[in-house]
Amino acid sequence: MLVVVVGLGAVVVVRSLDDATLFFRNADEAVTQRDDLGTSRFRLQGLVVPGSVEAYPGGVAFDVGFNGAVVPVEHSGDPVELFDDGIPVVLEGRWSGTNANAVYLSDRMLVKHDENYIADNGGRLDEADDGSGYGSANASPAAAAGA
Amino acid sequence: MLGVIVLAGTAVTLWLSFVATPADAVQGEAVRLLYVHVPSVTVAYVACGITFVASGMWLWKRTEWWDLVGSSAAEIASVFTAVTLLSGMVWGQATWGTAWEWDPRLTSTLFLFLLLVGYQALRAASPDRSSRARRSAVVGLLLVPNIVIVNRSVQWWRSLHQDATLFRTDLDFRIEGLMLFTWVFATAVGLVLLAWLLMHRFRIGWLANRVEERRLGDALTARRAEATS
């Protein structure tokens, strides 16, 4: 009897955690799940596509990319301090619609810093700024699938 | 002796963290929090590990020694977990743009802190020494499973928190030179500090038990004197 109760409890916990622990969706998942997501709120993770950042009154527009997919973002409010080309960001907001030219309307921005530490000096700076080192293991779909 | 090492080591760590090490290419000066945040959590983990082993040993041997080692380490662990959470909040505000998110790593670390606080509340709520030792030993056994969840949370679930820099299975350290040295040095100083605090906390705990016994003895003598007079 106790085993059954504990077992059922474990199933309920794991099932609810599965949804609750999905802290963000990567840009490619946000695109493939666009119809299901509709205009409900979710967190979006991706790297700021270099050269895509454009400031407008009251906000900033840019693209985030992950795993080959690109999502156009319109963020209202000031971007966070470390916001820059190639930086991984986690945004809170929703799709503007479900059609192919929908944009992601964001109102909260967090920077997802990675595990690399590089001294801030001349030669290394170029290496750090090209963005190739970004996108840590836990952001990959493979790591998420293993959960 | 250990105290002198800790004092000198802390001075060198401060110099390394604020003067000798460079700023980070992305994070800038905020990277200096690394030398507080990560050593703190390492010390907290080791202290929790000591409590875990001592809890198991108490359940086996039932000696005062193991009870005192376990409870002393748990108290120190809660302080270092608090330092980890607070320094992490400052660091998070500076780099992520938020002091707190209910993300797997942060939430599981908060849970660890609450578990350690609960451990002490339980001890304070148990007046009799053997039930106090038994109850806290049972809670102490939950610490290491909790640490495994905290440590693996960034791999099991998606987290705002970064992945491991040093303790990687591919052994490809994501930090270099003096930054790495400062980190390792600060951790070593932290571990000596842990040993020093543990020694003194154990001594205080042992003396407190003797005082308790003395009072009990005095009370018994007084009661007997009352009965015979």
Image: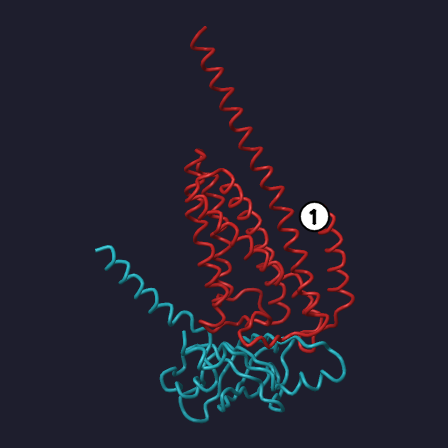
Q: Nearer the viewer, residue B189 or B103?
A: B189
| Chain holding disc 1 | B
Q: Position of residue B147 (x, y in %)?
A: 49, 60
Judging from the image, what is the letter of the chain drawn in cyan? Answer: A
Mark 1 element type? helix
The residue positioned 53% from the left and 86% from the top of the image is: A73
Q: How is the image coloured?
A: by chain
Question: Chain B takes which shade in the image?
Answer: red
Hey, which quadrant is residue B88 in on the image? Answer: bottom right
Residue B54 falls left or right of residue B191: left
When the figure is inspected, residue B119 is found, relative to residue B153, above or below; the finding is: above
Report the number of numbered marks.
1
Q: In the orientation shown, which residue stands out farthest toward the front? A: B61
- Quarter of the rendering occupied by the C terminus of chain B: top left
Residue B51 falls left or right of residue B96: left
Q: Position of residue A64 (x, y in %)?
A: 54, 86
Q: Position of residue A146 (x, y in %)?
A: 41, 76
Q: Nearer the viewer, residue B166 or B99?
A: B166
Q: Position of residue B55 (x, y in %)?
A: 46, 47
Residue that label 1 marks: B2
